[in-house]
Amino acid sequence: MSSILREWYSRGTSELIDGSESHKTKALGVQWDLATDELGVRAELVSIPRTKRDLLSAIALIYDPLGILVLVLIEGRVIMQDLCQSKIAWDIELDSDTTDRIKACAKKLSQTSGISVPRSLKVNPWESATLVQLHLFSDASIMALGVEAYLQVSDPWGNVSCRFIMGKARVALLKHVSVPRLELSAAVLAVRLGSTILTMIDFRVDGVYYWTDSTTVLRYIRNDQARYQAFVANRVSMIRESSDQEEWRYVNSERNPANHATRSKQSERWRKGPEFLLKEECFWPTEPAQMSDGVEGLEVKREIGPTGTRGYQIISYRIGLDIRQTGRLSLANISPSEKHPIILPYKGHLTDMVIQYYHEHSNHMGVMHVLSLMREKFWVVKGNAAVRRVLRRCIGCRRAHGKVNEQLMADLPHDRVESEKPSFYRTGVVLFEPFFVKLGRAQMKHWGVIFTCLNMMAIHLEVASNLTSDSFISAFRRFLDRRGQVKMVRCDCGTNIVGSWKVLDSSYEFLAGNKVGNELLRCGVEFIFNPPGASHFGGAWERFIGTVRRVLDIVLGTQQLDYEGICTLFCVV
């Protein structure tokens, strides 16, 4: 556009038009008529969209940064929102009702695609302009939000002109939101649009005015005393940061041009502006006389007053210098201080001292006990949180109930983290308490042997008929034949392998004997004993004793198996 403007100013309008085949060109995607110096948007649908995907593509193809065709485009966006809400698939053909709505929208689009607005906001002669004002109108409905901006210029001879700047429209949220909240959101959109326009124009503006047809929005903006809900408070804060209360005016819905966008009505008022902007300020709309200055109908936070919350009634009154409360206990046979406890704030030095007194008086009891003692005379706002806050600072309670320091654990040994070795290449072995096996009519004690792979924590179970070296060697040879060669075996040589079973004190004596040592040496196995008294060295495999015992207790119950049955059970488990 800058190159075209330079050629415009250098060669003149007539030469630029005569030297070109057409007096219309494109500037930043917008149609520019060089003869009339107007901007417009041409948008025609090649075919009627038949699916949701086609409709989205058609809406996205229309580029209208100034909002000239927003009255029609907002209708298409509403249709798209309805389709998304109905969760229809993207490529399913639309029903007849939706297709009729799209056809009506396409017809309106073809009728309004030739509309244009003046490119320059400055009227001739611009040097004689005495008053330049920016007017922004906002409106909202359950369907959409609409905002429109105009520039009003007055000269010394009483002539007033109004130029369209731009307009915006957005569909309303899918979540149900009240109309006053939507009106407030539209006001925020107007303030943001006004700030954008003021930063882009390069001439003075003598005044900015924001127009709305919602008296609720005006009451929100002008009331500085009430505390609003979070949704309202955030948007009122945005409005007050970018505008003054005196800049907000009231206009009825019939004279509000933004009303057409929210209801998708075609009108020339959207492009030309309302009639009263062509007149002096004395002819502008005035506020209704019955508009209230109170908080009735506004979303304000509840304060302590005649009607309380959380299931009880609060009536504040003064007895001397105390502010007390009463509920529904006036007929109870309790003391007056319990009927009407003194109200204390959530935070404050006096509140902290009272809580600390009752906490120490109750021998450092917990939150609920301290709170129950306090409520015999005092009622603390958010009492549970206040008591917790004070008790967290109690030094005595922190010393008595502080978190115990945890043992710092060393890094795992090398044989526990070798992932490339086969299973049971490095193994931990432990024997667990005896169980009875049937041998004819007699019962014999047998021991279980747990072989644990130190790498993947897999376990292998074997049966040892007694605590002799021969029995252990047999179990160990069965383990080697089934699982393959083992490089290293770790074992705990302490007495804490199976708890209080003193008979196992001698269970490791045979492991240190020559017979076992010679057998391990012949098999090429390195046998490593943990240091005496260091029971935590064998925790990786000793913890499986409880797991195996639980499974055996559940499977066996009270029955007793013979030797073959117990061997089969160990293989199955």
Image: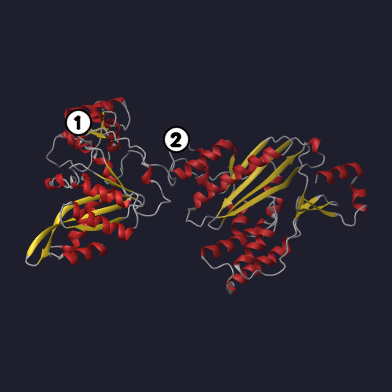
Q: Position of residue 259 (x, y in %)?
A: 60, 54
Q: Is residue 567 above or below residue 140?
A: below
Q: Earlier in the sequence, mark 1 or mark 2?
A: 2
Left or right: residue 80 compared with residue 507: right
Q: Quadrant of residue 44?
A: bottom right
CB contact under 8 Å: marks 1 and 2:
no
- The structure residue drawn at horizontal position 43% and vertical position 38%, both measured from the top left corner, is 226
Q: Position of residue 401 (x, y in %)?
A: 23, 33
Could you say whether the residue bearing mark 2 is in a helix, strand or loop? loop
Q: Which mark is residue 364?
A: 1
- Please name the colour scheme applied to the rendered image: secondary structure
Could you say whether the residue bearing mark 1 is in a helix, strand or loop? loop
- The structure residue drawn at horizontal position 17% and vertical position 63%, both measured from the top left corner, is 556
Left or right: residue 210 compared with residue 181: right
- Few, some or many residues within 10 Å of mark 1 (<14, 14–19, 20+): some
Identify the residue under disc 2. Answer: 225
Q: Residue furthest left?
A: 441
Q: Is residue 99 above or below residue 535?
A: below
Indicate which label's residue lies in the foreground, 1 or 2: 1
- Few, some or many residues within 10 Å of mark 2 (<14, 14–19, 20+): few
Give the Cα distance between marks 1 and 2. 42 Å
Q: Nearer the viewer, residue 473 or 309?
A: 473
Could you tell me the amino acid type at mark 1?
Answer: His
Q: Specify the quadrant that holds the C terminus.
A: bottom left
Q: Position of residue 107 (x, y in %)?
A: 69, 67
Left or right: residue 312 compared with residue 166: left
Q: Nearer the viewer, residue 182 or 394?
A: 394
Residue 568 visible: yes
Q: Position of residue 136 (x, y in %)?
A: 64, 45
Q: Nearer the viewer, residue 422 or 3?
A: 422
Q: Residue furthest bottom?
A: 96
